[in-house]
């Protein structure tokens, strides 16, 4: 996710607005107010008009911190052009130890759903001077609207103030020449099943608008971008390739959910302009770098982007249930609250799918969470090897692993719960669960995000043994074939360990239908009638 930063006003370089378009933020200077609220601003939590501490003009907006996050949001800005370059800026004053601020904005499609990453900055630091936030972004594919919002948070205590003035969003429509230089120090570092790319921004007479990163599975990148033909974002590696546009000033990007023990190579090309005017730098040699992922597999990865994902909820008591909410980082989380006009009694479970962990070692479980109101006393994290996946979870045996995690002090800020080794609990049928309890005296709000379980593929399915089974065709589309010297059974697993197909096999040639499997990498395990196991790997294209 792109992180942006605050910059002081001193020595700022000003760009003529007349050269690049008009301000799309209505009443961005905050000079027009009606009934104590700034016109054209739709969310004004703890906002008051300020006439003394101003950057320019007669007024600014004063934002007071409270026990929870307070929002200051503009009406949805329409007329966004996907692929267009936009300059977002505003001024703020934060010189109060009891308040801090940051931007939290997003691109939207025609239905108002988020497109691309949230635009958020680090929290502000106290300074006696006005400071400027100023960043350039490329509107992602599908974006036609923009929602502008800044937030204030309490620090030592609530009641502090920050001030805002001169908001602007400007569409840069100038046509610029090709970038002068490539970025430097382009490097790749694998971390489990992710590869993080880092670089130093290009310098020279003409700076880039952004970069296109091209990735290929293997030891080279064969594609080269063409002027006038924008390369779209594509993180689906099923064809062995991926691409991602990033803005100038962004110095890293992470490609995730990659295949185990695989080499990936990346090249980076700077460009100016967008659409049919896009101008890539392709002369000379573009920087490239490679890295190889480890034999770590992701057994569970749920970011709750739009719903509860692979998790299921089970309500034991009470009428409140786990639900989806638009909070978290990135936005989207599972939320549970036992408050309904007052604290009420509830017991509600949020349960993972069944996971087969037999062939894995060094299995770790981590997640992010936020908790506000009440306390952490009735919140638990559990793991089971005998739950049936559908009935009352209280009928199964669950092991309490709550104490291994860090819990929030309160407030709405998400924190990392930490990482707990659950290897000793791994079995053929393993479930993890978040268990919420409340009564008429204690009803917290608990929000869960980014639940992940990783494991290292054990010696039974290490890549150096995968060749024991020859599966063909590979890649496959509708069927796979394998030869067996003896009868037995075959099981197809997802790379995360979930059982997808289980079938008997006979001596000789066996054909297994895989037409219902989505594109990806799979593991096949055979067990013959003598109990001997063999492992293979294949992909679906």
Image (cartoon, grey):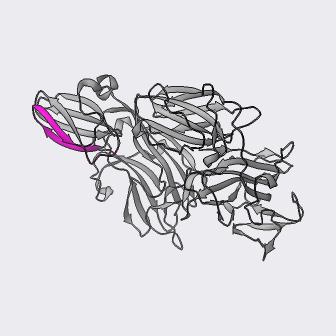
Whether residue 120 can be seen here: yes
Side (left or right) of 232 relative to 65? left
**Above or below, 473 relative to 391:** above
Instruction: Give x and y (percent) for residue 233.
Output: 53, 45
Q: Which residues are magenta?
A: 499-518
Q: Which of 395/474 is in front?
A: 474
Give the residue displayed 14% in from the left and 29% down from the top.
484
Tell me the quarter of the image containing the N terminus: top right
Give the residue displayed 14% in from the left and 40% down from the top.
504
Instruction: Give x and y (percent) for residue 328.
Output: 55, 53
The answer to which quarter of the image holds residue 3 is top right
Side (left or right) of 439 relative to 212? left
Q: Which of 203/262 is in front?
A: 203
Q: Which of 531/186 is in front?
A: 186
Instruction: Give x and y (percent) for residue 421.
Output: 43, 36
Q: How many marks?
A: 0
Tell me the quarter of the image containing the C terminus: top left
Would residue 125 be counted in the magenta stretch?
A: no
Side (left or right) of 52 relative to 413? right
Side (left or right) of 199 relative to 494? right
**Above or below, 386 relative to 361:** below
Would residue 517 be counted in the magenta stretch?
A: yes
**Above or below, 309 relative to 231:** below
Instruction: Give x and y (percent) for residue 186.
Output: 61, 28
Q: Residue furthest bottom?
A: 35
Helix, strand or loop: magenta stretch? strand
Whether residue 93 can be seen here: no
Q: Which of 394/117 is in front?
A: 117
Give the residue displayed 78% in from the left and 77% down from the top.
35
């Amino acid at each position: 996710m792109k992180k942006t930063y605050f910059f002081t006003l001193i020595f700022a370089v000003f760009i003529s607005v007349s050269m690049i378009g008009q301000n799309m933020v209505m009443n961005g200077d905050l000079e027009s107010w009606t009934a104590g609220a700034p016109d054209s601003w739709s969310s004004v939590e703890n906002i008051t008009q300020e006439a003394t501490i101003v950057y320019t003009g007669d007024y600014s907006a004063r934002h007071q911190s409270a026990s929870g996050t307070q929002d200051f949001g503009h009406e949805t800005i329409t007329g966004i052009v996907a692929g267009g370059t936009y300059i977002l800026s505003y001024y703020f004053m934060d010189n109060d130890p009891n308040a801090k601020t940051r931007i939290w904005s997003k691109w939207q499609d025609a239905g108002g759903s988020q497109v691309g990453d949230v635009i958020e900055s680090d929290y502000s630091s106290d300074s006696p001077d006005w400071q400027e936030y100023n960043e350039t972004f490329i509107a992602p594919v599908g974006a036609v609207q923009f929602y502008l919002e800044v937030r204030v948070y309490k620090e030592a205590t609530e009641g502090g103030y920050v001030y805002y003035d001169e908001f602007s969003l400007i569409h840069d429509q100038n046509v610029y020449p090709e970038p002068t230089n490539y970025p430097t120090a382009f490097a790749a570092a694998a971390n489990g099943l992710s590869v993080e790319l880092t670089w130093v921004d290009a310098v020279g007479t003409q700076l880039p608008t952004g970069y296109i990163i091209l990735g290929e599975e293997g030891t080279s990148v064969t594609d080269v971008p063409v002027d006038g033909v924008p390369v779209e974002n594509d993180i689906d590696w099923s064809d062995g390739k991926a691409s991602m546009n990033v803005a100038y000033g962004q110095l890293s990007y992470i490609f995730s959910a990659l295949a185990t023990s695989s080499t990936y190579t990346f090249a980076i090309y700077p460009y100016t302009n967008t659409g049919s005017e896009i101008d890539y730098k392709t002369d000379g040699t573009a920087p490239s770098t490679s890295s190889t992922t480890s034999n770590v597999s992701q057994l569970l990865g749920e970011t709750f982007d739009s719903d509860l994902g692979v998790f299921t909820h089970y309500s034991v008591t009470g009428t409140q249930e786990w639900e989806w909410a638009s909070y978290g980082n990135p936005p989207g989380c599972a939320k549970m609250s036992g408050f309904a006009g007052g604290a009420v009694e509830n017991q509600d479970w949020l349960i993972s799918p069944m996971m087969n962990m037999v062939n894995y070692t060094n299995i770790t479980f981590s997640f992010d969470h936020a908790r506000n109101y009440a306390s952490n006393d009735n919140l638990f994290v559990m793991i089971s090897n005998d739950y049936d996946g559908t009935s009352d979870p209280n009928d199964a045996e669950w092991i309490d692993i709550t104490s291994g995690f860090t819990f929030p002090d309160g407030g709405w800020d998400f924190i990392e719960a930490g990482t707990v080794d659950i290897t000793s609990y791994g079995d053929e049928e393993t479930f993890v669960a978040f268990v919420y309890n409340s009564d008429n005296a204690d009803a917290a709000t608990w929000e869960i995000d980014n639940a992940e379980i990783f494991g290292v593929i054990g010696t039974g399915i290490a890549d150096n043994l995968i060749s024991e089974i020859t599966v063909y065709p590979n890649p496959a589309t509708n069927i796979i074939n394998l030869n067996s010297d003896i009868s037995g059974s075959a099981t197809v697993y997802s790379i995360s360990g979930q059982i997808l197909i289980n079938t008997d096999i006979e001596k000789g040639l066996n054909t297994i239908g895989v037409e219902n499997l989505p594109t990806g990498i799979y593991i096949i395990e055979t067990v013959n009638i003598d109990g001997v196991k063999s492992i293979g790997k294949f992909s679906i294209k």
